Image (cartoon, rainbow, N blue to C red):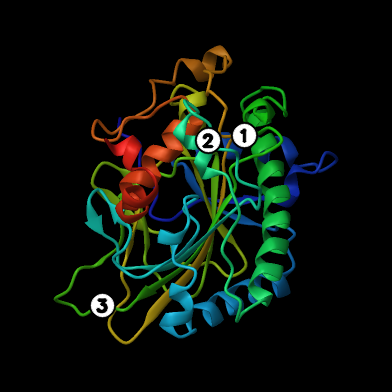
Amino acid sequence: MSVKKPNTLPVIDLSLFSKDHIKRESELEKLNKVSHETGFFYLINHGIDPTLLQQVQEVARRFFSLPLEEKLRVQMVHSPHFRGYNQPGSELTRNIADNREQFDIGAERQPLPVKPNAPAWQRLQGPNQWPASLPELQKIISLWQQEMTQIALTLLRALAESLRLSPTVFDVLYGAQPNEHIKLIRYPGQPAEGSHQGVGSHKDSGFLSFLLQDDQPGLQVEVSEGKWIDALPLPGAFVVNIGELLELATNGYLRATVHRVISPPAGSERLSVAFFLGAELNAVVPVFKLPCDFSKQAHGPASDPHNPLLREVGFNYLKGRLRSHPDVAQRFYSDVLS
């Protein structure tokens, strides 16, 4: 008998994972089920102040409202760390341009010294670019990044417990310097006869992804082959999805699900802010031993033959960046491309 696929995303309540909550065990079971079957869910009662979420969205809108010449001063092509601004059409998904304007931010760290024979992924570490005309952007986004990291770790450890593993089992991959990543994203409206690819079909590469949406729909999730559902905005909630690192680490038991964004209609726009929890760049993803009842349902990660998964985190992340941003790749990684 076929399993009926959902027409909407399930909901996970983060507050129920507190150690003394009477519904904790049932919510852990639910988290396991939805992460295995759907790989996408809404996260509610996460504890982040709604005022901060509003500030994040407002400052993102203010950034995208800056004159183009100011945004181009922090264009990504100036950064070997793939940080900064991109105009619509600059990023590619499966070699097709995405209709989204965006600003990429990572963990604020000093660049590693470039040494002969050092792995090229070490060049990914470094500082962000910040627009001088909008100093509050760094302050607000940095605060949000700190709070999102704590929320993400709480959920990651709950996910480990739902697998009947130690809550800290994934900490060896997360480590002291995780590859955290934020995207501020604006999708301009497109005419009916134009391309509707806000961002093309893809999976996320890290541990967990969190998306803060405005009230404009567009995110779609492929819950089964050829069946797409709308992840409609839910006020106050994050849309969360499993990344390929967790799919690899659980031999495919946890599901990294394909998703896309459809451009809004002409005369409108869509704003979203994404937080990605990744692993340390020098980590290598093992396969964790799951309980027998789960391992029997793990059939290996689903890898795109044109973009195969690598267990070496740094190389896997760099591969994705080089494919998505050919202008940065040509400027700073010509030796790798050759």
As shown in the figure, which amino acid type bears the numbered disc 3? Answer: Gln
As shown in the figure, which amino acid type bears the numbered disc 1? Answer: Glu
Counting from the top left corner in percent of width and height, residue 128 is at: 58, 58
Q: Distance between the residues labelled 3 and 2?
A: 37 Å
N-term mark: 1 or 3: 1
- For label 2, the crowd category at 10 Å Cα-Cα, with few meaning under 14, some 14 to 19 and many 20 or more, is some
N-term mark: 3 or 2: 2
In the orientation shown, which residue stands out farthest toward the right? 20
Horizontal side, residue 321 vs residue 114: left or right: left
Mark 3, residue position = 190
Q: Is residue 155 above or below residue 183?
A: above
Mark 2, residue position = 33
Q: How far apart are marks 1 and 3 (CA)?
A: 41 Å
Q: Which of marks 3 and 2 is in front?
A: 3
Q: Which label belongs to residue 29?
A: 1
Counting from the top left corner in percent of width and height, residue 233 is at: 49, 67
- For label 3, the crowd category at 10 Å Cα-Cα, with few meaning under 14, some 14 to 19 and many 20 or more, is many
Q: Residue at x 52, y 18 (%)?
A: 287
In the orientation shown, which residue stands out farthest toward the front? 116
Horizontal side, residue 35 vs residue 107: left or right: left
